[in-house]
Image (cartoon, rainbow, N blue to C red):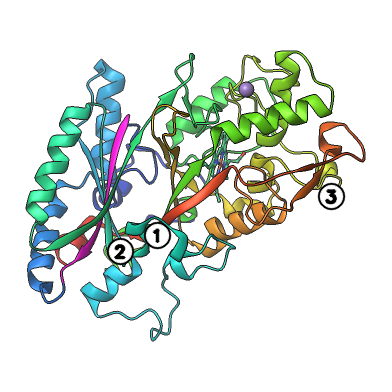
Amino acid sequence: MITLNNKKPVNIYDPAYDKLFENLQGNILKGHGRNFTSHIFLRFEENKKDKVKKWIASFANEITSCKKQIKENLAFKRDRTSGDTFIGFYISALGYSFLENFNSSEKETDFFGSMKDANISDIKPSDWESGFREDIHAMILVADDNLMLLREKEISIRKEMNGKCKIVKIENGNVIRNEDGAGVEHFGYADGISQPLFFSDEIQELETKYKDVKINFSSFFPLSQVLVEDPFLKNEEAFGSYLVFRKLEQDVDGFKAKEEKIASIVGRKTDDEKEEIGAIIVGRFEDGTPHILSHEEGIIDNLSNNFLHKNSSNGKCLFLNHIQATNQRDEASREMIMARRGIPYGIFPGEGREVGLLFMSFQSDIKKQFEATQIQANHYKDLIIGQNLPQKMNLDCFGKKGKEINVENFVKLRGGEYFFAPSIPYLKNV
Ligand code: HEM
Ligand code: MN
């Protein structure tokens, strides 16, 4: 019998999990890893419910299951064969109310709502980009390493949907990398390092690596961290996950200028000294080196997730760095951990072109995971994602007592939505 509250990592070869992997969408338990993405936001056409359902049922055959993703990973490890175009399908609360005559306000159980109604100090929806202000019923994620193949697939999906769905918006993501080949976000910092791991091969790799080293932080999480039973398909080993999508614009010049400014006030002169200012804000250096482990970048274990935070900095500073504000790394905060699957958008910062992050996270409970994390980051005045920042911030954390500086947000919400990633059998029989 399988349980979501597994005490040990799941073995991909355990036949007991075969059905779960087959029914579950990919990209939840493991990132799809493709370099290019297209995120198609759509609204089902009114009065065409039957046609819409028929289209979804056939489109379900194109969705990449967790099982297919696992097999593609094995093939890639074996002989570098790259996987097919990745496809995911996610439905919003409004989308469900269209398909299931389901009304979130009248249902006794608390299913989920819209990001537009979230109470997390967001920029209000009337100030979002136009498409995101409209009603969104679903999002299709298409991903590939080959941009031509991605575009072809996008076009064929748009054709298929014609007359059944209105396209509200399309966003495009593209991985950007540093010289080590690690994926970075637009401020230049390695990203996607700290992740919950679910599979025994991933945990074993860490155990081998840290064979003679103390394990401070366990990366193993049970499936219940991100999976729930498909609410519309009980008792079928059919699981799904809640997805948060946020388009977050990054002011790269503003961030770098503030880093320079703080450096000059606190008397950091060399490039390495200046780099530490950014590392204090993020909690890691650009190459990923955790600031708690080293005061300069370049340690061998730069992509380490094996550390804890000092409680002592809590309360001393007016703010906490991004990785501490979003994950305290104590027992209690483990329940907030999400599987982060975001991807940058825009290629070159500057020249008036907008760049940022298409933030995506999977979880079993949006309030307890994403919203609790965002609220905590707001509370600790996280300089990366904290909202309603104070105008003045003191520089105690940068080693300058009593000095203050003006701060503003470098990351701005352009729009987003909450979705559920249904099980594939639900979609086939919708
Ligand atoms: C980690 C950047 C938005 C939650 C990180 C890291 C970077 C980063 C550089 C360190 C790499 C890693 O540990 O994986 C950004 C940028 C954002 C952004 C530039 C916006 C443009 C968000 C949002 C949330 C979030 C919206 C959630 C509300 C986290 C969490 C971690 C993390 C939970 C891992 C912390 C840990 O476990 O140590 N982010 N992030 N981030 N971020 Fe963000
Ligand atoms: Mn820098």
Quarter occupied by the N terminus: bottom left
Give the crowd class for mark 2: few <14, some 14-19, many >=20 residues within 10 Å. Answer: many
Q: Are marks 2 and 3 in contact (CB under 8 Å)?
A: no
The residue stretch that appears in magenta: 35-45
> Looking at the image, can residue 215 be seen?
no
Spatial distance from mark 1 to mark 3, Cα to Cα? 33 Å
Q: Secondary structure at mark 2?
A: loop
Hey, which quadrant is residue 227 in on the image?
bottom left
Q: Are marks 1 and 3 in contact (CB under 8 Å)?
A: no
Q: Position of residue 157 (x, y in %)?
A: 13, 48
Q: Amino acid at mark 3?
A: Gly
Spatial distance from mark 2 to mark 3, Cα to Cα? 40 Å
What residue sits right under mark 2 in the picture? Answer: 136
Q: Are marks 1 and 2 in contact (CB under 8 Å)?
A: yes
- Magenta span: helix, strand or loop, mainly? strand
Give the crowd class for mark 1: few <14, some 14-19, many >=20 residues within 10 Å. Answer: many
Spatial distance from mark 1 to mark 2, Cα to Cα? 8 Å
Q: Secondary structure at mark 1?
A: strand
Q: Is residue 50 above or below residue 342?
A: below
What residue sits right under mark 1 in the picture? Answer: 417
Q: Position of residue 69 (x, y in %)?
A: 27, 37
Q: Is residue 204 left or right of residue 326?
A: left
Give the crowd class for mark 3: few <14, some 14-19, many >=20 residues within 10 Å. Answer: few
Q: Is residue 363 above or below residue 188?
A: below
Q: Which of the two discs, 1 and 3, labels the residue nearer the N terminus?
A: 3
Specify the farthest residue to the right: 402
Residue at figure coordinates x 76%, y 31% from the top left: 262
Quarter occupied by the C terminus: bottom left
What residue sits right under mark 3 in the picture? Answer: 315
